[in-house]
Every structure is written in structure tokens, then in C-alpha cells.
């Protein structure tokens, strides 16, 4: 069986805690492969900031979930030791830089240097993706932050969105749910108008062709 390995950043945990919780569920009906999640120090610190400074309910829920959940044997949760970051020189990270990031000077102590919190995230990701050794594992960063995606590209760190990770996990670990999702998406596309936005294909639903579930007597509200 294949093994899925994901690094979870704060934006993924805050915006998709419901998805993340589902990934950790144990279900005897699922044909599970091993799945591993890595929580960098950056993620914990960002969630802590959002919890206390922004009073974010989802950040509180994410931290509570990480601290107090018993996970099935098929799920491996790795929480980074903060001391690990001190053992990774920034020069080792720069060795894996593929191209420049215009908005930041990646040299330390410059006026536009990369913030320490982002340097720490790059250290964590570089360690898992480039320095630790593969052990037949390929780690992918799950993030919803465009800035972090650009940094990941610059340092050769594989990354994906929350939705893409959810689809891959469903495909590998819960094939029935994935097939149902694909079938539903295909049916929506057939009754939608295809367009383009930001260079990507988008489908706009035709609400007059949407099939609704059976309802009691009365008039259906229309927008």
C-alpha cells in the first residue's frame, strides 16, 4: 500500500479543520494505507497567534484537536520539536533555492529579509523534503496561503491546496466516497456553463436545471 505524507500549515488547519478531522478518522470499512501528517513549529505558533490575538474559533479548535485526540494506528501525527530548527543552518536551506522571490531578500539581516516565522517554515519543509532522507516517502505541503506557495516553489517544496489533498486522500483511502464525489462533479458539469477565470476553467451552474430533494407542500423560494 502507498503512504501519503503531508505537512500541514496554519492556513490549512484554520480554513479546513473539518477536512483535517475527517482525514484522521478511523473506519473499519476503509481500505487504509498509512498516512502521515507533520505539524511544523510554525503552524503551532501561527494558530496560537490567531487564537489569542484574533480570537479565532477555528484556530482554537485546531489546537484542541492536535492536543487531545487519539488517532487510529493507520494515522501517524508528527509534531515538530522546536529545537530541531536550531540544528538546521539557513545556508542549508538556501542550497535548495531554485529561483529568487522578488518580494523578499533571502539573505539574513537585510531591510527586506524574510520574516523569521517564514524562515522557520522553510527550514521545516526543507528538512522533511530534502534533508531527512526519503524512506520511500514524498512529503507535500498543504497550504492555502499564496505567499507560502511562492516560497515553496522557489525552494522545490511540493505543495497542494486543501481541496487537492482532500481529493487525493479520498481517492487513496476511501475510494467509494471519491467515486461518489467524481460522479456528482460530472453531473454538475453537464448542467453548467463552462467559462474561464484567472486562466482556470470554471463551471457556472444553471439553477433552473438543478434537481432538488423532495420537500413538503409550499412554494420554493427563488433568488
Image: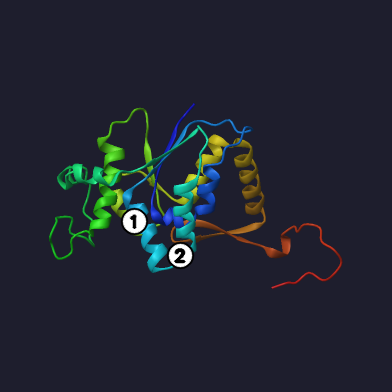
Q: Residue at x 14, y 56 (%)?
A: 108
Q: How many numbered discs sit on the rendered protein?
A: 2
Mark 2 to mark 1 CA distance (whole Å) = 13 Å
Mark found first going from the N terminus, 2 or 1: 1
Q: Secondary structure at mark 1?
A: helix
Q: Is residue 117 left or right of residue 146?
A: left
Can residue 180 be seen at all in this image of the molecule? yes
Residue 217: give x, y in percent of width and height.
87, 66
The correct choice, above or below, for 93 with respect to 60 in the image is: above
Residue 53: give x, y in percent of width and height.
38, 68
Q: Residue at x 60, y 41 (%)?
A: 178
The correct choice, above or below, for 89 with respect to 60 in the image is: above
Residue under label 2, please give it.
56
Q: Is residue 100 left or right of residue 54?
A: left
Label 2 neighbour load within 10 Å: few <14, some 14-19, many 20+: some
Residue 11: give x, y in percent of width and height.
41, 57
Q: Residue furthest right?
A: 217
Can residue 149 be seen at all in this image of the molecule? no
Q: Residue at x 58, y 30 (%)?
A: 31
Label 1 neighbour load within 10 Å: few <14, some 14-19, many 20+: few
Quadrant the C terminus occupies:
bottom right
- Residues 57 and 179: in front is 57
Residue under label 1, please give it.
45
Residue 122, which numbered label?
none
The correct choice, above or below, for 154 with respect to 48 in the image is: above
Q: Secondary structure at mark 2?
A: loop
Q: Residue at x 17, y 47 (%)?
A: 90
Residue 210: give x, y in percent of width and height.
72, 59
Q: Residue furthest left?
A: 109
Q: Is residue 214 left or right of residue 165?
A: right
Q: Quadrant of residue 45?
A: bottom left
Amino acid at each position: 500500500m502507498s503512504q501519503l505524507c503531508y505537512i500541514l500549515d496554519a492556513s490549512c488547519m484554520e480554513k479546513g479543520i473539518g477536512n483535517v478531522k475527517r482525514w484522521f478518522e478511523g473506519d473499519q470499512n476503509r481500505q487504509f494505507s498509512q498516512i502521515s501528517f507533520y505539524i511544523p513549529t510554525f503552524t503551532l505558533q501561527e494558530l496560537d497567534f490567531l487564537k489569542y490575538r484574533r480570537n479565532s474559533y477555528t484556530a482554537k479548535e485546531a489546537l484542541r484537536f492536535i492536543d487531545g485526540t487519539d488517532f487510529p494506528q493507520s494515522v501517524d501525527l508528527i509534531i515538530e520539536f522546536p529545537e530541531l530548527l536550531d540544528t538546521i543552518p539557513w545556508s542549508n536551506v538556501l542550497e535548495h533555492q531554485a529561483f529568487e522571490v522578488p518580494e523578499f531578500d533571502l539573505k539574513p539581516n537585510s531591510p527586506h529579509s524574510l520574516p523569521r516565522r517564514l524562515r522557520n517554515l522553510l527550514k521545516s519543509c526543507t528538512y522533511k523534503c530534502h534533508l531527512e532522507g526519503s524512506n520511500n516517502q514524498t512529503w507535500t505541503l498543504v497550504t492555502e496561503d499564496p505567499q507560502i506557495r511562492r516560497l515553496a516553489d522557489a525552494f522545490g517544496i511540493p505543495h497542494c491546496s486543501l481541496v487537492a489533498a482532500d481529493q487525493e486522500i479520498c481517492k487513496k483511502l476511501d475510494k467509494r466516497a471519491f467515486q461518489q464525489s467524481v460522479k456528482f462533479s460530472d453531473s454538475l458539469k453537464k448542467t453548467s456553463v463552462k467559462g474561464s477565470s484567472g486562466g482556470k476553467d470554471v463551471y457556472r451552474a444553471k439553477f433552473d436545471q438543478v434537481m432538488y430533494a423532495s420537500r413538503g407542500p409550499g412554494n420554493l423560494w427563488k433568488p
